[in-house]
Amino acid sequence: MQRRDLLKTGTLAAISTLSERAFAQSATKGAKLIPWSDQPPPVPAASAIKALVPWESLDSWITPNGSFFSIAHYDLPIIDERAWRLEVAGMVAKPITLTFEHLKALPRQDVISTIECSGNNGSPALISAIGNAQWTGTSLAGLLRSAEITRGAVEVVFYGADQGEEVVRKSTPREFKYISNFARSMSIAEAMNPANMLCYEMNGSPLPPANGFPVRLIVPGWYGVANVKWLTRIEVRDTRFEGRFMGRDYVTIREEKHDGKAIMVETLVGHMLLKSAPARVVARDGRYQIDGMAWGGPIAAVEVKIDDNAWTKANLADSKSEFAWRPWTLDWSPTPGDHTISSRAIDTTGNVQPAMDDPVIANKKTYWESNGQITRHIHIA
């Protein structure tokens, strides 16, 4: 995306100003990027995951469309917007079928929101599956109100056009296979959040195919898996939905102690957790600066720890959106040699991003929701 495209609206102009002041310092003349010495290995699932831009390559608070990560759980559907339809059905008094033009004619709304893959930092290769964008579309709550949800409904299910084969009771006499569409659900109350939208534009341009064209769900504050891409059907139900990506996958398994016994507790991946990350180190005129981001809640502060020294409060940029990440910086006067840099975010209620040896992280048996403190390694010549 060209800079002039980002400046189409006053909102994005303000974003650009923030980027230049608080995060894109390494893009200015005379700055030298000091590479991390712990570069991740190649991503093994390269066909399913796209645009994993290294942290140190980011130079904008808004992630350009071509640099925004995407993940496909099944196929990558190619959809003709003229033939696309969105159906709102199930426990509604007035079922709705919308064309793309009908949807775009509804009242518009915007939200600036960060989306993070719930597996980000859960494996050595997956460390930059996150991006921040301005999303434009129409209100999900408004559409559901128009359809008139009926008494007894408990959940809303969102179906994408992407589909693939599922196998149940594999390698048993009762094994069977079927074709399934990607789907996720949430409660009626969660779906009616006024920030949720049916999105058709990303940073002022149509959604890229890999990011859900022509229409996707945007639910600010939730991990990426809940933001269903290639949306084709919204179904209101009176029973809980348990598809693969609700009950069998995207489930965090954690060991807990109860009456002295270890048991495994399974919880669904949902809302994003408090987190921060050192993004890069730059040098300019003999001075060093550490840049990073914090997200996953109303951020009150970010602290940075270098080697085994005490935690130091970083400079935190102003919040421009309650759902977007916040840049932070810290001036640094390093000595030559190898160093470690860690960060931790603190929210407005006093919650602190957990350390990697905290039981909430250390006792996880799956890589989802890995919001432990991130430590990067660097060598200063």
Image (cartoon, rainbow, N blue to C red):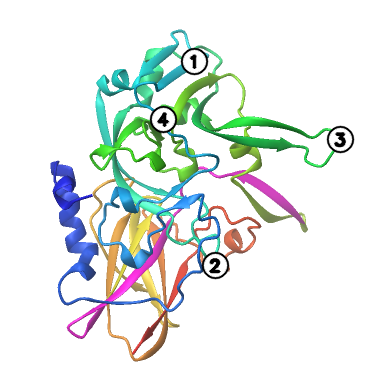
Q: Is residue 330 above or below residue 44?
A: below
- Identify the residue at horizontal 66%, vertical 57% (top origin): 365
Task: Identify residue for label 3.
Answer: 173
Question: Which amino acid, by three-letter code, is at mark 3?
Answer: Pro
- Identify the residue at horizontal 27%, vertical 46% (top origin): 321
Question: Is 145 left, or right, of 283 in this rendering?
Answer: right
Task: Identify residue for label 1.
Answer: 89
State the CA–CA distance, disc 4 to disc 3. Answer: 38 Å
Question: Which amino acid, by three-letter code, is at mark 4?
Answer: Ile
Task: Identify residue for label 4.
Answer: 79
Q: Earlier in the sequence, mark 4 or mark 1?
A: 4
State the CA–CA distance, disc 1 to disc 2. Answer: 44 Å
State the CA–CA distance, disc 1 to disc 3. Answer: 36 Å
Mark 4 vs mark 3: in front: 4
**Pick the front one: 116 or 1:** 1
Task: Identify residue for label 2.
Answer: 356
Mark 3 vs mark 2: in front: 3
Relative image position of residue 26 (x, y in whole percent):
23, 70
Question: Which amino acid, by three-letter code, is at mark 2?
Answer: Met
Q: Earlier in the sequence, mark 3 or mark 2?
A: 3
Which disc is residue 172 wearing?
Answer: none
Question: Which amino acid, by three-letter code, is at mark 1?
Answer: Ala
State the CA–CA distance, disc 4 to disc 1. Answer: 21 Å
Q: Earlier in the sequence, mark 1 or mark 3?
A: 1
Q: Earlier in the sequence, mark 4 or mark 3?
A: 4
Region in magenta: 262-288
Relative image position of residue 34 (x, y in whole percent):
32, 78
Binning the other alpha carbons within 10 Å of mark 4 as few (below 14), some (14 to 19) or many (20 upward) gives: some
State the CA–CA distance, disc 3 to disc 2. Answer: 42 Å
Callout 3 touching callout 2 (CB < 8 Å)? no
Q: Which secondary structure, mark 2?
A: loop
